[in-house]
């Protein structure tokens, strides 16, 4: 039986670049240009190559990893406060979270921490299941780098992203992130199966 797609939420303040990032990662053909706020939530499904550990009894001696085509579901969630009414349903079965913010926006880090604290109460995911994506600009706008000092976000991995110059690196970071998420999911599934067998 095939595994269900890994559900990944995209969260962040308005105009932080969530939809642009979702289109880029999923290779969606939606136009990138004029800003249009997401209404509710849009879901993008796609496949990507991820590294998964080989089984212990694998005969391969050249690599400890297998390259798999993994099914990913990106849930591009609106920054509208009304979405919080649907939070339990949106959070259900989420495997990972991308927290997106704009480096140049004065209030984004505060909003990001608030989002993290609210959503994490429902998700209860480990820090390794989160990736902070800091949107920066390569068009001459000043990039006033704002370090996340808040304790609740300091433990999370972070990558800076400029769609014009960092696209390859960000895609690789997302691939590594998803490999880690899928490995953690697999381990938890195996632990649950062992627990059931022992009962």
Image (cartoon, grey):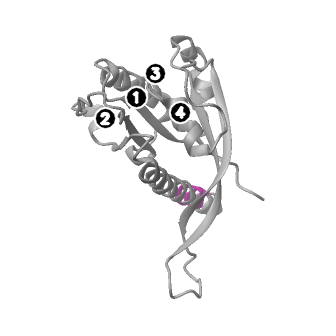
Asked if marks 2 and 1 touch (Cβ < 8 Å), the reply is: yes
Type of secondary structure dominating the magenta stretch: helix
The secondary element bearing badge 2 is classed as helix
**Label 4, label 3: how far apart the Cα atoms are:** 10 Å
- Residue on which the image places disc 2: 153
The residue under the point 65% across, 61% down is 69
Residue 73 magenta-drawn? no
- Residue on which the image places disc 1: 116
Q: Which tag, 2 or 3, sits closer to the chain's start?
A: 3
The secondary element bearing badge 3 is classed as loop
Residue 188 magenta-drawn? yes
**Label 4, label 2: how far apart the Cα atoms are:** 23 Å
**Label 2, label 3: how far apart the Cα atoms are:** 20 Å
- Residue on which the image places disc 3: 15
Q: Quadrant of the C terminus?
A: bottom right
Marking on residue 20: 4
Occupied quadrant, residue 23 = top right
Between 28 and 100, the residue placed more toward the observer is: 28
The magenta-colored residue range is 187-192
**Residue 12 location (% of width, % of height):** 45, 26
The residue under the point 46% across, 19% down is 14
């Amino acid at each position: 039986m095939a595994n269900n797609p890994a559900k990944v939420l995209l969260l962040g303040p308005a105009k932080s670049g969530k939809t642009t990032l979702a289109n880029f990662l999923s290779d969606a053909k939606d136009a990138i240009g004029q800003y249009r706020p997401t209404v509710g939530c849009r879901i993008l499904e796609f496949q990507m190559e991820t590294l998964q550990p080989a089984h212990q009894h694998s005969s391969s001696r050249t690599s400890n990893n297998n390259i798999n085509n993994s099914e990913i579901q990106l849930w591009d969630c609106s920054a509208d406060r009304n979405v919080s009414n649907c939070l339990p349903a949106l959070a259900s079965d989420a495997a990972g979270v991308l927290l997106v913010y704009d480096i140049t926006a004065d209030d984004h880090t505060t909003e990001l921490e608030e989002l993290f604290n609210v959503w994490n109460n429902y998700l209860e995911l480990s820090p390794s299941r989160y990736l902070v994506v800091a949107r920066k600009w390569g068009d001459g706008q000043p990039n006033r780098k704002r370090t996340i000092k808040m304790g609740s976000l300091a433990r999370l991995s972070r990558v800076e992203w400029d769609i014009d110059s960092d696209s390859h690196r960000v895609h690789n970071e997302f691939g590594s992130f998803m490999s880690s998420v899928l490995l953690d999911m697999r381990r938890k599934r195996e632990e649950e199966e062992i627990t059931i067998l022992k009962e």
